[in-house]
Image (tube, rainbow, N blue to C red):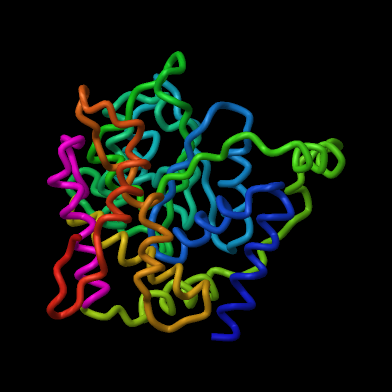
Amino acid sequence: MEQFAARTKAILDRMNSVIDGKPAETRTALLTLLAGGHLLVEDVPGVGKTMLARTLAGAVGGTINRIQFTPDLLPTDITGVSVYDQTRNQFEFKPGPVFANVVIGDEINRASAKTQSALLEAMAEGQVTADGTTYRLAEPFMVVATQNPVEMDGTFPLPEAQRDRFMARISMGYPDADAEVAMLRDHGAGSPLTGLGPVVDIEEARDLVRHVASLHVSTPVRRYVVALCQATRTHPHLRLGASPRAALQLQAAARAQAALAGRDHVLPDDVKDVAVAVLSHRLLLERRSGADSAQDIVRTILSDVRVPTEDAPQTR
């Protein structure tokens, strides 16, 4: 537990030294890595989405690949392609950039839905199938994707199946005045990542993920996770609620939250702390619901759903 705390603190310190004024966002990014999930970072251009992804990837030893999504990008540009080797008279598979420990997908919603879908199998199952052959991906495997708001020119909305495979979504937002001044002072001369190496190696990163997966989750907490997800499926303002995959990822994220808090078991407060980041991007609002946002609906559900016990009702 002491080694876990020291290593995660080192990663957070590195990220916060590069990303000024965004401690909550950097913590969620690390939490997603520890939980074995994938992260979607959404906001307008220039607020540090790609820098956050590069900082997290650089802090963890292992292989890093970056994919710049464009409208003409093909699925094989991501997964790889089979090339005929004339000397051996057979096809040889050339792995694509998805074969890495951390894959940075920059501006993922600038590619077509067909190309976006090339990541589905990799994100869900940790493997790629090409020409009838399945290739396992490295462990740990994490996709950190950035996207611009759908309203901006040249963007394609992510399909529901794609969004559901991201464990969490965060929005960077503009830094406050003091953080922006600090950014101008510290990073005005060049990239803040120049000369910075990883703070943990890949085997240590695997140990961190395994430790998080071993944390205890009690039956009442599991019932609470299920109750929250079921509440989204019956909410009158939602036409698509949280899937069973969302429930699994909410439990995994709560484990990571508990581990970062120094505990070996999950509390209901851990579930509450990560619920908005984990659930909101999966929900689709009714067009005439009048609701402000999916985040507001999740917060309302959190206030309405009680933590179940053996005999207590689930809602009040």
162 within the magenta span: no
Q: Residue at x 41, y 58 (%)?
A: 274
Q: Magenta span covers which residues? A: 220-242
The secondary structure making up most of the magenta span is: helix
Report whether 88 appears left or right of 55. left
Residue 90 visible to the viewer: no
User: Residue 61 location in percent, x, y?
Assistant: 59, 63
230 within the magenta span: yes
Instruction: Choose between 151 and 190: the one closer to the eye.
Output: 151
User: Residue 60 location in percent, x, y?
Assistant: 58, 62
In the displayed structure, would residue 163 be above or below residue 39? above
Q: Residue at x 34, y 70 (%)?
A: 268
Identity of the residue furthest to the top in this view: 153
In the displayed structure, would residue 292 be above or below residue 200? above
* Residue 90 figure quarter: top left
User: Residue 292 location in percent, x, y?
Assistant: 35, 31
Q: Quadrant of the C terminus?
A: bottom left
Residue 236 visible to the viewer: yes
In the displayed structure, would residue 195 be above or below residue 178? below
**Total numbered labels placed on residues in the image:** 0
Q: Residue at x 36, y 41 (%)?
A: 296
* Residue 236 figure quarter: top left
Identity of the residue furthest to the front in this view: 316
Report whether 190 appears left or right of 314. right
Q: Residue at x 26, y 55 (%)?
A: 304
Report whether 181 appears left or right of 148. right
